[in-house]
Image (tube, rainbow, N blue to C red):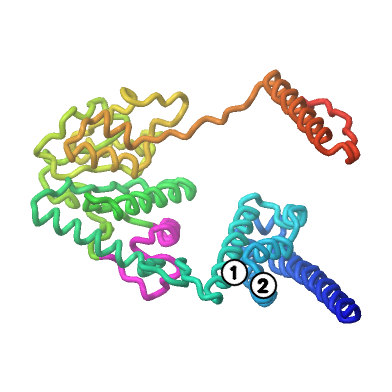
């Protein structure tokens, strides 16, 4: 019996040693994969600035290759808690990630992918044990991803527009004046291209969507490349390829003038400009059938939305944002999606001030502590650290106290 116990313990020690060596080899192989896929000569600091997606693709390839040995190893793990512990031990160290993955956004992406891998492996083991797993790729009452999700929202978007037309509850037609787009720099063109896509996204999921048209759209080769990269509603996402077809009620691109795109009399059109002298009335005028937004910041006289409205013979109105929002250094030029949100509440009969407060969200200012406050915070943290160490030493008197490092002077 004694010999049997000794042999059993010997076998157990051998298995434990092999298990530890396998973990080390897997961890080393993971680091090698990341070195090869993420840290390549062509993905140097200079290259990563011009092609940041390259490193992200490298991390995706690395994690896909990581998942295969992880799955083989975790198939022999006994409990779910052991799985999570084993996976964390196999992942590269934090110092390694900081050294070879420079960008914080890339490190965050890698961490999120590792977390997804952890959850996926745990769910896989639970399903193999006969448990019911409700997650993507497992049991799910309703799972909408990618193209299926877009098709469902497309149907809802179309049905809402049709029901509003059938019940004669249409919002005014929303027209974006693009006459100045081709004259802007690449950066400004990209900004407005993203704003127009965001305008569609908010309208696409709204319970009361606008009928949107883009008027005076005459792109040159440069602008055509930019909008093809950003306007998914017209060209489709990159994953769709050639199989994408625009929605029947997607924003319409036209070279027609603003008046022709509105298809109503000029007196029934409202032009929104933050430089207009006349404010929006508190109640929406009942005769308004179309509203025009200009893709311009109005920083230069040649790209003034007020002059564009005067040229077309349309009355320009200004949203009284300053009456209800304190900007305090923030730009008063609202994005197109924010302006459309205000107008949606406004034409639904809600109070104009309430519509502005619901729609405008200003980014918080970066708060920085003064030198005195930083020293006070540092002193409090130092005292708390000392108290915690004393309490720990009293609870564990047999342990040797940790040698205190010399306090460094704060650098101004």
Q: Is residue 355 magenta?
A: no
| Residue under label 1 | 121
**Residue sticking out furthest to the front:** 1
| Residue under label 2 | 74
Of 151 and 392, nearer the camera is 392
Quarter of the figure with residue 52: bottom right
Dominant secondary structure of the residues highlighted in magenta in the image: helix
Point out residue 111 in the picture as x, y percentages from the top left corner: 63, 56
Left or right: 288 as drawn, with respect to 271: left
Mark 2 in CB contact with mark 1 (< 8 angstroms): yes
Q: Residue at x 39, y 51 (%)?
A: 182
Q: Secondary structure at mark 1?
A: helix
Left or right: 298 as drawn, with respect to 29: left
Task: State how many labels appear.
Answer: 2
Q: Is residue 240 magenta?
A: yes
Left or right: 410 as drawn, with respect to 176: right
Rate crowding at label 1 as few (under 14), some (14 to 19) or many (20 or more) other CA atoms within 10 Å. Answer: many
Q: Residue at x 38, y 61 (%)?
A: 232
Q: Is residue 306 visible?
A: no
Left or right: 60 as drawn, with respect to 342: right
Of 219 and 70, nearer the camera is 70
Q: Residue at x 42, y 65 (%)?
A: 237
Q: Residue at x 36, y 65 (%)?
A: 149
The tag earlier along the polypeptide, 2 or 1, is: 2
Quarter of the figure with residue 96: bottom right
Point out residue 105 in the picture as x, y percentages from the top left corner: 61, 51
Q: Is residue 221 visible?
A: yes
Of 263 and 310, nearer the camera is 263
Point out residue 123 in the picture as x, y percentages from the top left corner: 54, 68
Please give the range of residues in magenta: 220-247
Give the CA separation, mark 2 to mark 1: 8 Å
Give the answer, above or below, for where 31 lies relative to 171: below
């Amino acid at each position: 019996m004694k010999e049997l116990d000794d042999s059993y313990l010997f076998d157990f020690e051998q298995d434990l040693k092999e298990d530890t060596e396998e973990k080390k080899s897997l961890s080393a192989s993971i680091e090698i994969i990341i070195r090869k896929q993420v840290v390549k000569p062509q993905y140097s600091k200079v290259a990563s600035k011009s092609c940041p997606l390259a490193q992200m693709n490298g991390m995706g390839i690395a994690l896909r290759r990581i998942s295969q040995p992880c799955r083989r190893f975790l198939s022999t793990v006994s409990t779910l808690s052991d799985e999570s512990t084993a996976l964390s031990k196999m992942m590269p160290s934090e110092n390694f990630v900081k050294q070879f993955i420079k960008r914080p956004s890339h490190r965050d992406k890698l961490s999120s992918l590792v977390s997804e891998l952890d959850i996926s492996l745990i769910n896989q083991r639970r399903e193999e044990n006969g448990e019911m797993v409700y997650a993507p790729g497992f049991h799910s009452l309703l799972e909408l991803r990618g193209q299926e999700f877009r098709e469902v929202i497309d149907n809802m978007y179309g049905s809402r527009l049709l029901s509003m037309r059938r019940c004669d509850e249409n919002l005014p037609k929303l027209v974006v004046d693009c006459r100045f787009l081709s004259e802007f720099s690449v950066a400004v063109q990209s900004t407005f291209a993203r704003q127009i896509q965001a305008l569609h996204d908010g309208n696409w999921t709204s319970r009361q969507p606008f009928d949107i048209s883009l008027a005076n759209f005459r792109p040159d080769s440069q602008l055509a490349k930019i909008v093809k990269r950003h306007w998914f509603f017209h060209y489709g996402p990159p994953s769709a390829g050639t199989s994408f077809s625009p929605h029947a009620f997607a924003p319409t691109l036209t070279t027609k003038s603003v008046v022709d795109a509105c298809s109503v009399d000029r007196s029934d059109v409202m032009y929104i400009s933050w430089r207009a002298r006349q404010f929006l009335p508190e109640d929406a005028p009942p005769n308004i059938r179309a509203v025009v937004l200009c893709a311009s910041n109005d920083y230069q006289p040649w790209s003034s939305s007020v002059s564009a409205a005067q040229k077309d013979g349309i009355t320009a109105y200004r949203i009284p944002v300053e009456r209800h929002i304190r900007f305090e250094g923030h730009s008063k030029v609202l994005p197109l999606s924010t302006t459309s949100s205000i107008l949606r509440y406004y034409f639904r009969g809600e109070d104009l001030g309430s519509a502005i407060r619901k729609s405008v969200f200003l980014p918080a200012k970066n708060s920085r502590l003064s030198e005195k406050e930083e020293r006070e915070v540092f002193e409090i943290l130092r005292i708390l650290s000392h108290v915690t160490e004393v309490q720990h030493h009293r609870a564990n008197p047999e342990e040797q106290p940790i040698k205190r490092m010399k306090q460094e002077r704060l650098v101004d």
